[in-house]
Image (cartoon, rainbow, N blue to C red):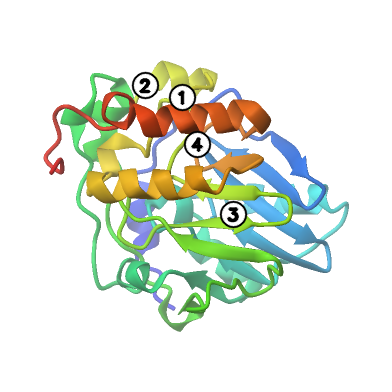
Amino acid sequence: MEQNQDSKFEAAFLPITSIGSGMGVLVLPDVFCYTNQIVNLAVVGTKDDFVLVDTGMPKSADEITEMITEHFDGEARPSAIVLTHGHFDHVGSLVELLEKWRVPVYAHEMELPYLTGKKDYPPGDPGVDSGLVAKMSPMFPNHGINVGEQVERLPQDGSIPHMPGWKWIHTPGHTPGHISLFREHDRALIAGDAFVTVKQESLYKVLTQTQEISGPPRYYTTDWNAAFESVKTLEALKPEFAVTGHGIPMNGEELRENLSYLVANFNEIAKPKNSRYTH
C-alpha cells in the first residue's frame, strides 16, 4: 500500500475545529455519529460486526480508535470501511487506520481513481462564498491517495458488505463517485456531503455548529446539476434520520421539512452565484 500521501496531508494539516469535536451522538441503537474536528464519521453495527463510514481528518487515527474503544466499551475493529467519497476530510486517517486493521475498504467505482493514486480532485474554489472557510479552500489538500488493492468497488446491486438492510445510492455532484447510505426499515440516511446541516463555507458557523440545512460544500462541488439531482433523490426517500458529513444529525419532521425546502430553493440556498464549476 502506498503511503506517500501522508506527508502531503501533514504539510497541509489545518487546525480547524468545532465545539462538537470529540463528541458523539447515538442516532439509533446501531448508528453512532462522531465529530472529528469539522467532519462527521459514523459507526454502524454492533461490536462483533460493524462498519466505519469515512475516516475523518488527517492525523486522527488514534482518536478514532479510542472513540471506537469507548463506544463499544472495549477494543474492537470494524469488519470494513465504507467511504462516501475521497476528499481529505473523509479519508484523512485511512492509511493509518489500515495499518492498524487491514480491513477491506469499499467505495463507488467512479471514486476509485482518487483512492488509487490515479487522479487528483480539482482545487477548492474560493469564489463561491465570502465565508472564511471558502476563502481558505485552495489551501486544503486536493490530491488523491493510494491505498492500492485494499479498496474495492461497492457491489453493483446496491448492497453494502457487512451492512445488512442498507443500500448505497449514487449521489454525485460533490464528487463523481459520491454515495449516500440508506436503510429502508427505519429510513436512516447517511448522506455524506450530498447535503449538510451546517453552512460549511462560514468559519463562524462551522466553529459553532450552527444548524442550517445546506447543499454540498460549495468550494469542492464541481457538478451542480448532478448535486441538485442527488438532493432530490434523497428528499424523495423521506428519511427519518440523517447523519451528514458536516453538522449536527437531523431527524423527523424537521429533517423532512428542511430537505423539502432545500429542494424547492436549491439555486438560492445551495448553488453559488459565482463558481468556476457552475454550469
Identify residue type, mark 2. Ser
- Nearest to viewer (mark 2 / mark 3): 2
Q: Earlier in the sequence, mark 4 or mark 2?
A: 2
Number of the label disc, if any, that sits on residue 202: 2
Q: Do the residues labelled 4 and 2 touch (CB within 8 Å)?
A: no
Q: Name the residue under label 3.
A: 61
Q: Name the residue under label 4.
A: 246
Q: Earlier in the sequence, mark 1 or mark 4?
A: 1
Q: Are marks 2 and 3 in contact (CB under 8 Å)?
A: no
Residue shown at 39% from the left, 34% from the top: 263
Find residue 61 and report its image quarter: bottom right
Q: Which of marks 3 and 4 is nearer the N terminus?
A: 3
Q: How far apart are marks 1 and 3 (CA)?
A: 22 Å
Vertical placement of residue 23 versus 189, above or below: above
Number of the label disc, if any, that sits on residue 227: none
Q: Are marks 1 and 4 in contact (CB under 8 Å)?
A: yes
Q: Nearer the viewer, residue 19 or 202?
A: 202
* SS of the residue under disc 4: loop
Q: How far apart are marks 1 and 4 (CA)?
A: 8 Å
Q: Locate the C terminus and report the quarter of the image it occupies.
A: top left
Q: Which of marks 2 and 3 is nearer the N terminus?
A: 3
Q: Residues within 10 Å of mark 3 (few under 14, many from 20)?
A: many
Q: Residues within 10 Å of mark 2 (few under 14, many from 20)?
A: some
Q: How far apart are marks 3 and 4 (CA)?
A: 19 Å
Residue 242's x, y, as percent? Answer: 60, 41
Vertical placement of residue 199 versus 263, above or below: above
Q: Are marks 1 and 2 in contact (CB under 8 Å)?
A: yes
* SS of the residue under disc 1: helix
